[in-house]
Image (cartoon, grey):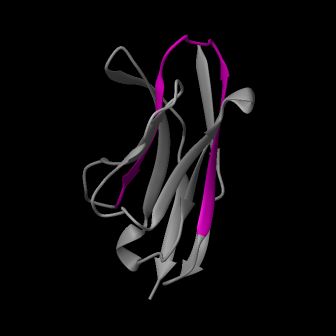
């Protein structure tokens, strides 16, 4: 099995920054993508950003482009999400997931991000 543990969430004022981390352990795959998603109260889970283990350009939701940066440390099996210029609408529970063969089958428990106005 795969275990994903997120950390780094918290309460921040609008305009502030946070850095989320997601550490993976357990079963490994030769090729996969790690992504960040978020879910606000009463809303569907939405895609935020993703990066392939093999490299290449990461990709982002339009709502976070230019403000969030996803990166990874393959040696540590860890993916990061640097979030700058945070807005109240970024408030959500942030999850990381692993996509293998086109499906996100593995998820962490989430870390709460709250942005006050």
Can residue 9 be seen here? no
Residue 48 lies left or right of residue 83; in this view the side is left
The residue lying furthest to the front in this view is: 56
Residue drawn at (41%, 78%) of the image: 87
Quarter of the figure with residue 53: top right
Residue 108 lies left or right of residue 61; in this view the side is right
Q: Is residue 33 above or below residue 84?
A: above
Whether residue 26 appears in magenta in the rendering, the answer is yes
Residue drawn at (61%, 67%) of the image: 18
The mark total stands at: 0
Q: Position of residue 85 (x, y in %)?
A: 48, 77
Q: Position of residue 31 (x, y in %)?
A: 49, 15
Q: Is residue 112 above or below residue 37?
A: below
Residue drawn at (50%, 40%) of the image: 96
Quarter of the figure with residue 72: top right
Q: Is residue 32 above or below residue 48?
A: above
Residue drawn at (40%, 66%) of the image: 66
Q: Which residues are magenta?
A: 18-40
Can residue 1 be seen here? yes
Whether residue 96 appears in magenta in the rendering, the answer is no
Quarter of the figure with residue 105: top left
């Amino acid at each position: 099995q795969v275990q994903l543990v997120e950390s780094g969430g918290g309460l921040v004022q609008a305009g502030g920054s946070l850095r989320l981390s997601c550490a993976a352990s357990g079963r490994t795959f030769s090729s996969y993508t790690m992504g960040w998603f978020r879910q606000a109260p009463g809303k569907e889970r939405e895609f935020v950003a993703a990066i392939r283990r093999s490299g290449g350009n990461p990709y982002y939701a339009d709502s976070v482009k230019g403000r969030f940066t996803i990166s990874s440390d393959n040696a540590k099996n860890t993916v990061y999400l640097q979030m700058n210029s945070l807005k109240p609408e970024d408030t959500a529970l942030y999850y990381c997931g692993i996509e293998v063969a086109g499906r996100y089958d593995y998820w962490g428990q989430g870390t709460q991000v709250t942005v006050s106005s």
